[in-house]
Amino acid sequence: MVEGIETRLVVDAMFEKFQKTTMPERGYGKAEVTLVGRYFSGRKQTFPGGTFWVGYGHMGLGTLLVIEQVKQVRNI
């Protein structure tokens, strides 16, 4: 659940291939992928020091991509 929106991950053969390609036993791999997901940019909030976008991660400085389905994986 993110910002009141329910998200679900489709765990199928394509997702498994994505995981095996990008997180091999030794180090990290690379892949070109087609994903379905939701992008959350945060919210505009006003503070005594001004108005800022507040998002996710350390001190709310990041944005968030929630992967819901891996459609295609190509090793690079």
Image (cartoon, grey):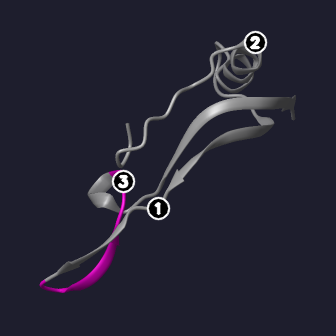
Q: Who's the residue at 35% across and 66% down the image?
A: 43
- Residue type, numbered disc 3: Tyr
Figure check: 20 above or below 41 = above
Judge from the rendering whether residue 70 lies leftward or rightward of residue 51; answer left or right: right
Figure check: 10 above or below 39 = above
Judge from the rendering whether residue 19 lies leftward or rightward of residue 73; answer left or right: left
What is the distance, in whole Å, between disc 1 and disc 2 at their CAs? 29 Å
- The magenta stretch spans residue 39: no
Judge from the rendering whether residue 8 lies leftward or rightward of residue 17; answer left or right: left
Please tell me the numbered disc located at residue 56: 3
- Residue type, numbered disc 2: Ala
Q: Which residue is mark 2?
A: 13
Q: For mark 3, does the 10 Å Cα neighbourhood hold few (<14), some (14 to 19), or many (20 or more) residues?
A: some
Local secondary structure at mark 1: loop
Considering only order in the chain, which callout, 3 or 2, is on the residue closer to the N terminus?
2
Determine which quarter of the picture holds residue 16: top right
Please tell me the numbered disc located at residue 26: none
Considering only order in the chain, which callout, 1 or 3, is on the residue closer to the N terminus?
1
Please tell me the numbered disc located at residue 41: 1
In what quadrant of the picture does the N terminus appear?
top left
Q: Give the magenta range.
A: 48-57
Considering only order in the chain, which callout, 2 or 1, is on the residue closer to the N terminus?
2
Residue 29 place in picture, x, y as percent: 72, 28
Residue 42 place in picture, x, y as percent: 39, 62
In what quadrant of the picture does the C terminus appear?
top right
- Front-lying residue, 1 or 35: 1
- Residue type, numbered disc 1: Ser
Determine which quarter of the picture holds residue 17: top right
Residue 3 place in picture, x, y as percent: 35, 49
Q: Who's the residue at 71% across and 16% down the image?
A: 20
What is the distance, in whole Å, between disc 3 and disc 1 at their CAs? 8 Å
